[in-house]
Amino acid sequence: MTAAAELGELLSQCQYYSPMTPEQIEDTVVTGLAADAESPQLGGQPVSPELLMLLMQEGYAELERHCAGTQNAITAADFPAALEWLRRAAEAGDAGAMVSYAMYSAQGAGLVTASDGPTLARDLKAGSQRAGDYLDRAVRAGDARALQVRADAYANGTLKPRDDIAAYADMHALARTEQGRAWPPRLVELYLQALAAPLDAAQLAQARERGDAVWRECCASGTR
């Protein structure tokens, strides 16, 4: 199970990897904005430039830890195999693989085109249907990373029906975990602000209360 999860992670993550410094990431964001590139969405609104830059810097730090030395060795052609290895590990009970399967199947479903063929499109659709359940199972298993992925799923209506209260609740819970406390405070602040934007005061209070309950269920015992 561990070997399948590690192989799936490597093949899925590292197809996107090429070394970038924080300064290069900042330049990429600025250049994209200048060229009117479409910004990622969170809760139906474009992610702010500062939040996008911090997310990319945090993401590339994670890629660097896992993928250094793999550039050009892993390509998009490895993606179907990556999902299959992650699915096998998830079915065997690996919570990390459940989260990665959900995250990458959602990304793949957004990128697939007619030229990729009906088989891949069908597989990704089936994967999306099981991925939401994987996220719930991973949260119950204490995997804090699942909280961010599920928050995005709720905010954007992918893998889960859109639910702005649930999205904020999951990120509120993540902020209380060891992983969330390791993030730059400004990143957490901006993420919560973006997810709070659609909520009124009563809904925000409800989301925070729900997030505390999610944290107790997931991570209060000191698991990830």
Image (cartoon, helix red, strand yellow):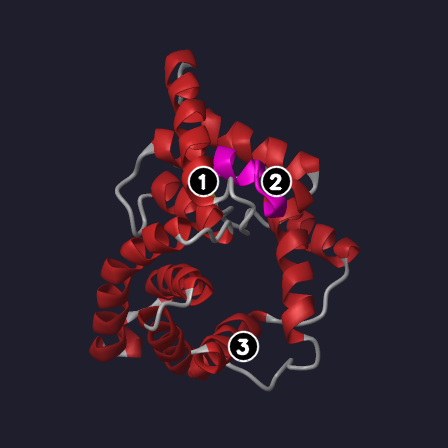
What's the amino acid at mark 1? Leu
Identify the disc placed on residue 42: 1
Q: Position of residue 126 (x, y in %)?
A: 22, 66
Mark 3 residue type: Leu
| Residue, disc 2 | 51
The picture quadrant where one finds residue 16 is bottom right
Q: Residue at x 49, y 36 (%)?
A: 173
> Which residue range is magenta in the image?
170-179
Where is residue 201 shown, x and y percent of the image?
43, 13
- Rounded to the nearest angstrom, the CA distance separating label 2 from label 1 is 11 Å
Q: CA distance from mark 2 to mark 3?
A: 26 Å
Confirm whether residue 46 shows in the render.
Answer: no
Q: Nearer the viewer, residue 159 or 224?
A: 224
Q: Nearer the viewer, mark 1 or mark 3?
A: 3
Secondary structure under badge 1?
A: strand
The N terminus, quarter of image: bottom left
> How far across and how far down the image is residue 160, in percent?
28, 46
Q: Amino acid at mark 2?
A: Leu
The image quarter containing residue 108 is bottom left
Is residue 58 visible to the viewer in this orientation of the structure?
yes
- Which secondary structure dominates the residues rendered in magenta? helix
Residue at the image point whose x is 44% and y is 83% from the top: 78
Q: What number is the disc on residue 10?
A: 3
Badge 2 or badge 1: first in the primary sequence: 1
Pick the front one: 58 or 140:
140
Q: For the point 39% across and 79% down, which residue is it?
A: 85
| Whether residue 99 is situated above or below residue 209 in the rendered picture | below
Describe the element under mark 3 as helix, strand or loop: helix
Q: Is residue 138 left or right of residue 126?
A: right
Q: Is the Cβ of the residue at disc 2 closer than 8 Å to that at disc 3?
A: no
Crowd class of label 1 (few under 14; some 14 to 19; many from 20; radius 10 Å): many
